[in-house]
Image: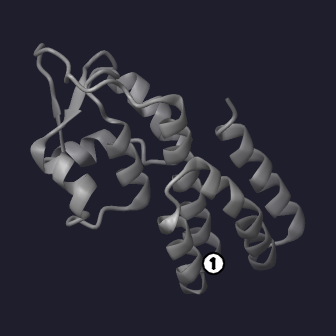
Amino acid sequence: MRDSDLYAKTEAGRNEIQLRSHHIAPALRSMLLVVDGHRTAGELRALGAGLHAPADALEQLAALGLVEHLNGRAAASAPPPSDVAVRYITLSGLLAEAVREHMGLRGFFMQLKIERCSTLGDLEALLPEITTAVGKARDGKYAQLWEKSVRAAIAR
């Protein structure tokens, strides 16, 4: 994949957003959400890094048939996601990753809280609770540094 290539969701990718039938990892799902037919592979990879998606996330999504190379076709008619949408996706991915990485099965109910959040404000309100939980799982200093990095990632 060249950095200048454009990628868009396939019909299967749009269905995955609604139905979650493939049960893909949260970081890959976040990456799928930002694929819009307007951003280049290079831009998507940069966004993916902020979402802690694997370096080959686009390739994985393409292998699953969820995204496709536009091959010179016109970009999708849908507008690119707004800044708020990108920040929501980024924050939800970072919170889910922290719960998975630091809390394991103990974080199941916290993960459900993240998934119930429907706005950026809901996720931001949940951030202190997750920071506290990360602090209990690791230590307080680590949790404060983690929260600072999360806030930097979603800064306007």
Q: Residue at x 35, y 43 (%)?
A: 33
Q: Which residue is drawn at 58% across and 48% down?
A: 120
Q: Which residue is nearer to you in this view: 115 or 64? A: 115
Q: Where is residue 88 in the image (x, y as percent from the top left)?
A: 53, 45
Q: What element carries label 1?
A: helix
Task: Give the quarter of the image for residue 98.
Answer: bottom right
- What is the three-letter code of the residue carrying label 1? Met
Q: Residue at x 41, y 49 (%)?
A: 30
For the N terminus, give its image quadrant. Answer: top left
Residue furthest bottom as drawn: 106
Q: Where is residue 14 in the image (x, y as percent from the top left)?
A: 19, 47
For the C terminus, give its image quadrant. Answer: top right
Q: Where is residue 79 in the image (x, y as percent from the top left)?
A: 32, 24
Q: Position of residue 24 (x, y in %)?
A: 31, 62
Q: Residue at x 54, y 51 (%)?
A: 119
Above or below 145: residue 152? above
Residue furthest right as drawn: 141
Mark 1, Cα crowd under 10 Å, few <14 / some 14-19 / many 20+, is some
Above or below 29: residue 154? above
Residue 56 can be seen, yes or no: no
**Is 84 displayed left or right of 53 in the figure?**
right
Above or below 153: residue 13? below
**Is 92 displayed left or right of 75 in the figure?**
right
Tally of numbered discs: 1
Task: Give the quarter of the image for residue 100.
Answer: bottom right
Residue 30 can be seen, yes or no: yes
Q: Name the residue under label 1.
A: 103
Coloration of the structure image: one colour
**Is 28 displayed left or right of 15 in the figure?**
right
**Is 110 displayed left or right of 142 in the figure?**
left
